[in-house]
Amino acid sequence: MFAALCGAILIGFPVAFTLAGVAILFAYLGWALGAFDLGLLRALAQRIFGIITNQTLIAIPLFVAMGVILEKSKLAEDLLVEMGRLFGGLRGGLGVSVMTVGALLAASTGIVGATVVAMAMIALPAMLANGYDRAFSAGTVCTAGTLGQIIPPSTMLIILSEVMSSAYQQAQFREGKFSVETISVGETFAAALLPGLMLFVLYVVFILVRALLQPRIAPAMPRAADAPFDLVRFATVLVMPIALIVAVLGSILGGVATPTEAAAVGAVGALLLAAIRLSKPSERAPYHAAIAAIVAIVVLASATTIRPQRSDATALDLALAALAALLCLVALWGVVSAVRRLARAGVTRDIAMGATSVTAMIFATLIGATIFTLVFRGLGGDLRVEGLLEAMPGGPTAALLFTMGVIFLLGFFLDFVEISVIILPIVAPALLLMGFDPIWLSVLIAINLQTSFLTPPFGFSLFYLRGAAPPEITTGDIYRGVAPYIGLQALGVALVWLFPQIATALPDLLF
């Protein structure tokens, strides 16, 4: 069944339909051979309904919308220009600029495609014009974009959290524990933050060391007299993404908001920042007022409980309720004005289409995967995989090494959504029964899954870059450029394996 799935995907058939089609085909084949009970398929409606109504997964379209809005608002372009002015005088400085912007956009948007395409169109021509090696430039841009999957918030971490939480519950049921613990998206975000920053540091050190040893591949950029570095302008450009990161990630890690609520705040915040970026200074009053009103609402809601319908409500309660209602109206006015501004700029259709298409692809794959997993388990596939892992010489460590190797190899042909929803539900319960920490295991797998964006021939970042890169960048240049970064990601996995505190310290502190 698994071989048929891989074969159909390699032929090029759409993944979501391949998952469902292969599952139904093998369900009837198993029924004909007396190896499958068709009554199991009655659970499909409940499973699909569970995916569509999952409160956590609602964060995915909101985070996707946030990323698309920031891409269309040219925020990445402003950041790259200012970072180039700051670091350009160093050998490898443009590469450091690209990687830094990639990390900032990762924490702001979590969207790989938008980041890679934006930097391919803005940074690559500047790097090539400044004498940077083509392969080095292509590899740096590609890798900077993938930071959006390991630095929270990201769609990969949301999906991974859901899958691992379900696997963790299954493992506890198998152990006879019926008061089960779960893994929250907030814990996964907290666990991935330090490893994501660690990867960013590894990339920057590699760029600087290689530029020092091979000056010709990443020469220093001469400072232009007409475009000097301006600290005030730099701070102005930087404050918007930093504010969004604090609002979204800070509210999740601080326990103020759930990931879904924080994603909604992020989408509204991105909308207002995009409107500010696309409007004249004299037209920005509604957006500034809306941001101030939203901040005031959060402060007010954190400081007191506003319930004017209580029988013992005082005059102060009623006054606070009236103030809160007024602040909501101001925020609504700003948001409506921002939507109108983006509509006049002609980007609302692109935002809606981009967010809807990515969300539909993810949810269609999730639905196809739940059908595949149900039939695979009905045929006894999960028991065979579990038996294989338990029988491996070397015990739990060998089983985990084997699993990580399989995930890495599958990354050459499948993307993170497919691996997360097909492979992990099968292998994760068995690994957790062996005693591995679910949070630590989630981060190890997340870094491994990140490499699926860079591994040829089907790495998504490679496709994004190939479509947006200048014609002088060849596919061979891209493959050669990403190879060292794949090695650095393997080093990142090894460091988290050897020092689990990198992944577990922050969740332990916050949760």
Image (cartoon, helix red, strand yellow):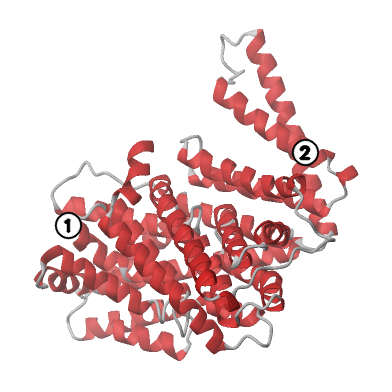
Observer-side mark, 1 or 2, equals 2
Q: Nearer the viewer, residue 373 or 11?
A: 11
Quick check: can you spot residue 507? yes
Identified by mark 1, the residue type is Leu
Residue 68 in the image, given as x and y percentages of width and height: 65, 61
Can residue 370 be seen at all in this image of the molecule? Answer: no
Residue located at (42% from left, 73% from top): 486
The residue shown at (28%, 74%) is 405
**Dot 1 crowding, Cα within 10 Å, few <14, some 14–19, many 20+:** some
- Helix, strand or loop at label 2? It is helix
Front-most of residues 350 and 412: 412
Residue 20 rendering spot, x and y as whole percentages: 40, 77
Q: Residue 211 is drawn in which quadrant?
A: bottom right
- Label for residue 433? 1
Q: Residue at x 49, y 67 (%)?
A: 209
Mark number for residue 235?
A: none
- Depth order, front residue of 111/265: 111
State how far apart marks 1 and 2 are (Cα).
52 Å
Location of the C terminus (image quadrant): top left
Q: Where on the picture, by quarter, is residue 415?
A: bottom left
The amino acid type, in three-letter code, at marker 2 is: His
**Residue 441 occupies quadrant:** bottom left
Q: Eyeballing the image, is 106 above or below 298?
A: below
Q: Estimate the x, y position of residue 276 in percent, counting from the top left.
A: 79, 48
- The N terminus is located in which quarter? bottom left
Q: Along the horizontal axis of the image, is 422 left or right of 257?
A: left
Label 2 crowd (10 A; few <14 / some 14-19 / many >=20): some
| Vertical order, 212 against 250 (above or below) | below
Kindly identify which residue carries mark 2.
288
Question: Which element type, helix, strand or loop, lies under badge 1?
Answer: helix
